[in-house]
Image (tube, rainbow, N blue to C red):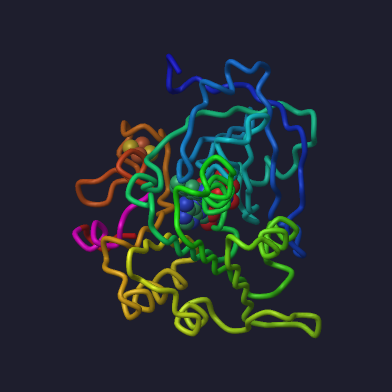
């Protein structure tokens, strides 16, 4: 992209309501031509700035895989007082919005090659992990990685997003899926309880393994020690931060933690890297 402040104009092809409370929606976006889609070359873990003209822009993690050639997908939670997220939720299919990016670093696929991958997600923060899993499960990529174990939790069954897709992953022999909710209902047949407790119970092997972690701060806080107790060193636990941002390209200073800008040095960091930074996140 020649000017990093200039957004692509993309069209909303489809909007899916993801949860019972209807405040999380997934937007499938298409570019006006294939060349622009090719220019928007990203790796799972990266984010983009989505803008609604007249309302502003917000950083949102990319939820589709780079191997999904036809569209780029984002899942957005509407904050009751949120200007941009509310404007996005008011959009209809066929409308055009702005897309700037891709920005930031990504999950360390070179480091992950040949290793078992443990993926731990919570709530709607599972977006870039969905991108990662779609990528890892692609027939052209799957043999490059070991066993995949996916833990995903939410408060209630109705708050688990990507429901149908995750159910289809659970049917596959090449990924082990563990869903959990804090408050199960009568139809719930999987785990109950908080994510770190389920990780401890299932105890995925840490030899030659790497863990990717993205979720609410409280889940991340308690899952890190659970993974360390299983033998994962801090260098092998990777997480993603959601600091407030403005420019997305290291110019405005809005997102810094110590000497790092989350928009260009992150959002993906290992726990070992985070331990060296001031605890401002
Ligand atoms: C790298 C990155 C990836 C992200 N990925 C996603 C995603 O995939 N899906 C998604 O729904 N959201 C994601 N977010 C968060 C998203 O950017 C914010 O929710 C959004 O910018 C809010 O915009 P708004 O204009 O609606 O809210 P505003 O009008 O700016 O604020 C509304 C309220 O939300 C609070 N708020 C806004 N942003 C943040 C924040 N980052 N941290 C804490 N509080 C905040 C404000 O303090 C205020 O109370 C991501 C953020 C980052 C930095
Ligand atoms: S958002 Fe401007 S420096 Fe990071």
In magenta segment, residue 14: no
Going 43% across and 35% down the picture, which residue do you hit? 103
Closer to the camera in the image, 265 or 90: 265
Lateral position of residue 131 relative to residue 212, left or right: right
**Image label count:** 0
Where residue 259 appears, x then y in whole percent? 20, 46
Figure check: 6 above or below 120: above
Lateral position of residue 132 relative to residue 86, left or right: left
Lateral position of residue 258 relative to residue 52, left or right: left
Q: Quadrant of the N terminus?
A: top left
Q: Residue furthest front?
A: 143
Closer to the camera in the image, 251 or 194: 194
Where residue 116 appears, x then y in whole percent? 42, 61
Figure check: 145 above or below 181: above
Residue 84 image-quadrant placement: top right
Magenta span? 268-276
Where residue 236 appears, x then y in whole percent? 31, 61
Figure check: 244 above or below 31: below
Going 49% across and 49% down the picture, which residue do you hit? 143
Where residue 244 appears, x then y in whole percent? 42, 48
Closer to the camera in the image, 191 or 141: 141
Going 66% across and 61% down the picture, which residue do you hit? 172
Going 70% across and 37% down the picture, which residue do you hit? 28
Q: Quadrant of the C terminus?
A: bottom left
Residue 122 image-quadrant placement: bottom right
Lateral position of residue 86 relative to residue 112, left or right: right
């Amino acid at each position: 992209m020649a000017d990093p402040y200039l957004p692509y104009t993309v069209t909303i092809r489809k909007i899916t309501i993801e949860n019972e409370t209807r405040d999380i929606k997934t937007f499938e976006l298409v570019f006006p031509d294939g060349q622009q889609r090719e220019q928007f070359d990203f790796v799972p873990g990266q984010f983009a700035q989505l803008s609604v003209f007249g309302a502003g822009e917000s950083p949102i993690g990319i939820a589709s895989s780079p191997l999904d050639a036809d569209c780029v997908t984002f899942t957005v939670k509407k904050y009751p007082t949120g200007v941009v997220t509310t404007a996005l939720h008011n959009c209809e299919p066929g409308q055009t919005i702005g897309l700037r990016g891709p920005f930031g670093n990504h999950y360390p696929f070179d480091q992950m090659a040949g290793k078992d991958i443990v993926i731990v997600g919570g709530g709607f923060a599972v977006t870039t992990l969905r991108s990662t899993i779609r990528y890892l499960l692609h027939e052209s990529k799957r043999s490059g990685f070991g066993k995949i174990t996916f833990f995903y939790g939410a408060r209630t069954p109705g708050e688990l997003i990507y429901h149908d897709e995750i159910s289809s992953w659970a049917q596959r022999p090449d990924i082990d899926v563990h869903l959990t909710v804090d408050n199960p209902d009568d139809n719930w047949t999987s785990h109950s309880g908080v994510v770190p407790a389920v990780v401890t119970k299932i105890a995925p092997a840490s030899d030659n393994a790497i863990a990717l972690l993205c979720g609410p701060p409280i889940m991340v806080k308690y899952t890190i020690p659970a993974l360390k107790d299983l033998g994962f060193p801090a260098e092998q636990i990777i997480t993603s931060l959601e600091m407030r941002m403005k420019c997305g390209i290291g110019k405005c200073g809005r997102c810094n933690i110590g000497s790092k800008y989350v928009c260009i040095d992150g959002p993906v960091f290992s726990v070992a890297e985070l331990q060296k930074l001031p605890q401002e996140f």
